[in-house]
Image (cartoon, coloured by chain):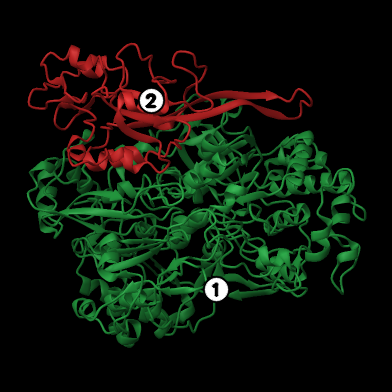
Amino acid sequence: MSNQLAFYFDASACSGCKACMAACKDRSDLPVGVNWRKVFQYGGGGWVPDPLDPRYTLPNNIYSYAVSVACMHCENPLCADVCPASAITKQADGTVLINTDLCIGCRYCEWACPYGAPQFNEGTGQMTKCDFCVDLQAQGLNPACVDACVMRALEVGDLDELRQEHGSIDAIEPLPLANITKPALVVKPHRHSSPSGQGAGRINDPFAEEV
Amino acid sequence: MTEKDFLSKALTDIALTRRSFLKWSAALGGSAVLAGGVNYGLKAAAVTAAVGEATWVPSACWHNCGGRCLLTVEVVDGVIQRVKTDDTHEDTPDFPQQRGCVRGRSQRMQVLAADRLKYPMKRKNWSPGGGQKELRGKDEWVRISWDEALDILSSETKRIVKNYGNESIYSVTQGDVNRTLRLFGGHASGWGMTSWGTWVDTPLITGGYDVRYSNTGNDRLRLRDSKLIFMWAANPAVSSNGSPTYNFLQAKKAGAKFIFVDPIYNDSAMVLADDWVPIRPATDLALLLGMAYVMITEDDPEKNPLIDWDFLDAGVVGFDEDHMPEGSDPKDNFKDYVLGTYNSQPRTPEWAAGICGIPPYRIRSLALEYATTKPTTIINGGASTRIHNGSSTSQGFITLACMTGNIGIPGAGVGLSCHNRAGNAGPALVSAGGSSVPGISNPVDARVNYNQSWEAVLTGKYIAAKDDIRDINFQMIYHGGYITANQCTGLSKGIEAHRAVEFVVTQGHFHNTDARYSDLVLPITTQWERYGTFTAGNREALFFSSQSIEPLYEAKDDMWVAVELAKRLGVDPKEVEPFPLKQQIFNRLVGAKVIKSDGSGYEPLVTITASDIAEMGVEGEPQTGKIPYKEFKEKGIYQVPRSPNDKFGFTEFEDFRNDPEAFPRGTESGKIEIYSQPYADKVTGYGFSVKHPLPTYDKVTEGYEDTFGDFENKIKGDYPLQLYTIHYQRRSHSIFDNVPWLREFFPQEFTMSPSDAESRGLKQGDQVLISSRHGKVLRRVHITERMMPGVVTLGQGAWVEMDEKSGIDKAGCTNILNGGIYTDQGNLGFNSCNAQVEKYTGPINLEPDHTWAQRIIIEEA
C-alpha cells in the first residue's frame, strides 16, 4: 500500500473515442474549453515507393495510438509548488486538489504542469482540474472516466497495487518524462508506443491541433 | 428582431436564458457561464447545492448508431444532473456491461440544449402556395401557436392534394404522420438503401439470412475461434461504438490475426491490426477478382489446396462449367470469367493492382493467406458497397468465401457484420414484443429512389422500373426523423428542389438542415420526454427506457401531431392512434421474449402483476416471466448472461454446410448461387443498370477510373482525388452535430495524405476548398499519413451551412459533394465520389465549429 491513489491506463486497448472525456465533463459540469481529461492520438510513419515496383506506394511503419490523460496527482505536484495562493494541496490519499476559495486565477499552475491538467475556466476566472471524483470515491464508486471506458482501458487504485499488477511504466510518448513530477500513473504501452523522449512521431489528433 | 439578433442575444443575455429554464418542468437551475460566452443550457455548476434525493431513471439513447447502450439519468428535484451507463452487473469480457459512447455520455447536452426547437414556427415570407419560396433556407422565422401551425399544415395538405393529387406529397418522415396521410389518400415515398450498400438483395444469392443481412458470421464468442479476421471497410470503434470493439479485442486476445482492408489506418486498426492493406475506395471487387485469379491458377488439390472443391460441388452453383444452372450458358461460369477464357480480360493481380492500388505480389499473398487459413472471417462494414455499381462487390465477397470454404464453419464467415450486430451474429436472445398497433397501407404506390428525388422535383419524371419512366409532380415535402435533406445524396440540387415546391414542413428537435429549408417547423419531444420506449441492443440485450422529464416548452409527440392533423383532415384519429403509448409499451412488455437457458426456445421475459397493470392504467392480464416488471423498469436493461460453450452460439450457414441436402438454402437450386439470374434480374429491373448473373467488374461511376480524364494514358481529370465519406465520431449520422462539447472533441476536419497536401501547397490546418461535380464545401485540412495517397475523407452528417454569396457550404456537409446518381440496386453510393482540393483564398474565415452560434431561432417569450 502506498497511500497514493493512481490511474492505470492501457494504451494498447484505447480506441481514442473520448467517451471518458465526455463522462468527466458530464459529471463535473464542465464547459466547452475545460477538459479535465484529454484524449489525443500520437503517431507517425510515411509512404515510400514500392522497391519492387515504382508504380506502387507502400505504407512504411504507419502507426497511431491514443493516450488518455487527466491529472496525474503527482508525487511532486509542480502545480502546488508554484501556486502563489497556496490553493493547491496534496491530500492524505495522494489526490491533488485545487481549493477554489483560494485560487486567484493567475494560471501559473497551468504553465507549470507538464500534463496540461489545470484548466482555466473563463467563466469563473479560476483554475480547475481533475479531482479524482472525490465525491464518487467517497461513495465507494469509481471515477466517472473509469466506468465509462468502452474498451476498459482505465482503472483506479493504489499505486503500489497497480504497479504489482500491471508493471511500473509511467511514461510513454507523448507524455513527459516521469522524473519531472513523478506521476501517480501506470501505463500499459501500445504495441507501437515509444518510451517518453524516444519517439519519432507527433501528436496527430485534430482535437489537440486545434486546442 | 432578426435571427442574427436573436442569436447574439442568446450569447450575451445569460439572465434571460436562466429565467427561461425555470419555466421548464426540468427546472434547470441556471447556466454555467462558458468560455466564449456560448451558452448551451447547462444547469448551474453548483451541483452540490442540490438537496433532494437522487433517482436514477433509465432513459433512452435512441439513436441509429451502431452501439446501442444503456443510459441512465440522475434526477434530483426534477432536474437532470448527469448520466451514467450500465452498472447493472459486474463487468466481464464474457458478460460485458453495455457501456455508452462519447455521444451517449453527452446526451444531456443534446436533450436539454438551448437550441431545442421550442415553439411551432412559420417562415416570415411564407404564404399559402409558398410565398417567396426562394427565401427558404435564408428567411426569418415567426413564432406561431400550435393551432395556427396545424391549420397551416392541414390547409396546405388539403389544397395540394386537391390541386395535384396525393402523389404530390413526398413524405419522408418516420411512422406516425404517414398513418394520417395514408388515411387521407396516401403519399409518395422514397426508397434506396442508405446504410448497407448492396447487401440488401444478396439473399437472392445465398437464400435468406437467418436474421438480417447485417447479422452474418458468428456470435462474439465463436468469433474467438477465428484464426484470421479481415476487417474489410470496417471501423467498429467509430461506427459501432459501444461493446463491439471490446468483443473484437477478446478475439484478438484468443489468438486471431487481424488484417484491415481500408483506405485509412482507422481507429479500430489502431487497437486491433496486425496488418493494414490500403485500398482505393470502390475498388474492392477488383481486389477480390485478383485474389480469385491467384486461387484458381495456383490451386493444386494435392500439393497446394487453395479451393474447397468439395464445398463448391455440394453447395454452390456457378463456379465452373460443370456447376451451372439449367438454361444458362456453361461458358458463362465464374472460373472462366476470371481466367478470361472467353473474354479478353483475365482478372490477374496485375490487372487488379492497376485499379485498387495494391501491388500484385501483395494481392497474391493475401489470396494465399485467405485460402490457407481456416477458419477465416471477413467482417464487412457497409462502406465497400456504399458505392455506385456495387452489386457485384457484395456478390464477390460471398464468392470468395465459398471458394475458400470459409462458410458455415465456426469461426468462419462473410458478409455485412456491422451496426449493433457487428461481430455478434445470431437470432436475438431477448426482444420486445409488438405494440399491436395495426399498420396502415399506403394507397399511393409512387416510390422515387432517394438518389433521384430532388431531380424528380425539378424534372417531373422518375424511373419506376426498367423501361418505366413515370411522371411525378412533387409539391409538398414532409420531413421528420429520417432527416432526408441532409442525409441523402444530391443536396445541392436538393436545395433547389426545396425552393421549387409549394410547401415544406419539418418536425424535429433542432433547426437542422431540413428545418432550415422549410416553411413550417414543428417542435417534437425526445424519448426522454415520452412515456417509454424499447431499444434493441445487440442480440443479448434489450433496453427499456422510461420518461425522465416533461416535454420541453411546447414540444409534442410525433403521434400527437399525427392525431391533430387527422382531426383537421377529417380522418379518424382513433385509427391513427388506436390506443395510447403506455398501452403500446405494455403490449410490448407482454410480448417480450427471452431465450430459455437450455436454448430450446423462448419464454416470456416479464412478470406482470394485477397491481402493475392497475398502476400503469392499461388493459391486460397478469403473466409470469423471468423478471418482475418493476425490476425491469428500474434497471432499464435485460441482458442474457453468456459464457463460452453455452447454448447460444451461432454460425451462419452451419446447418447448410454440414448437410446441404437436409438444409437447402432458399434459392432455386437450394445452394448458394454465385451465378444468379434472379439477382441479375432484380438489379436490372430497378431500371438503373444492367447486371450480369456473375460478380463481373463494371466501372464504378465516380470511382477510381473517373478521377482520370484519360484513363488509358493515366491523365488525371478535373476531380483527381477519390472522396469517401466516413461515419464520424461527433455524430450518429446527423444527430449530435450541434452539441458544442462534441464539436470541440471532433472538429469535422477534412483529411488528406501528406503527398496530396504538399503538391497543393497545403499546411496543417489550412482552409481548403473541396469541390466535386456537384458542389463545394470549405473545411480545415488535417494532414496525416494514415490516409492513403490519392484519397481524401470527410465525416458524413454535418448540417449544411451554406454561404449564399459564394454557394460554398461552410460546414462540410458531404451530401453537397455527393451527387444524386442512381445505379444498380438504387443504394446511395456515398463512397464513390471524385473531388478536387485547393487552398482557399476567398473572404470566408472558418472559426472552429464549437464557437459557432447555436441555432436558437425563437427566444423564450
Residue sitting nearer the eye, B77 or B519: B77
Badge 1, how many Cα within 10 Å: few under 14, some, many 20+?
some
Describe residue B496's horizontal placement relative to residue B32 as left or right. right
Which residue type does callout 2 highlight? Gln
Q: Relative to B180, does residue B259 appear above or below in the rendering?
A: above
Query: In the image, which is nearer the foreground, mark 1 or mark 2?
Result: 2
Q: Position of residue B653 (x, y in %)?
A: 66, 63
Describe residue B348's horizontal placement relative to residue B462 as left or right. right
Residue indicated by mark 1:
B447
Q: Which dot marks residue A56?
A: none
* Contact flag, marks 1 and 2 (Cβ < 8 Å): no
Which residue type does callout 1 highlight? Arg
Supply the letter of whichever chain is green. B
Chain for disc number 1 = B
Q: Colour of chain A?
A: red
Q: Position of residue B463 (x, y in %)?
A: 62, 70
Residue B300 appears in the rendering: yes
Chain for disc number 2 = A
Q: Which dot marks residue A164?
A: 2
Q: Relative to A126, does residue B268 appear above or below in the rendering?
A: below
Identified at 54% across, 64% down, the residue is: B450
Identified at 66% across, 53% down, the residue is: B412
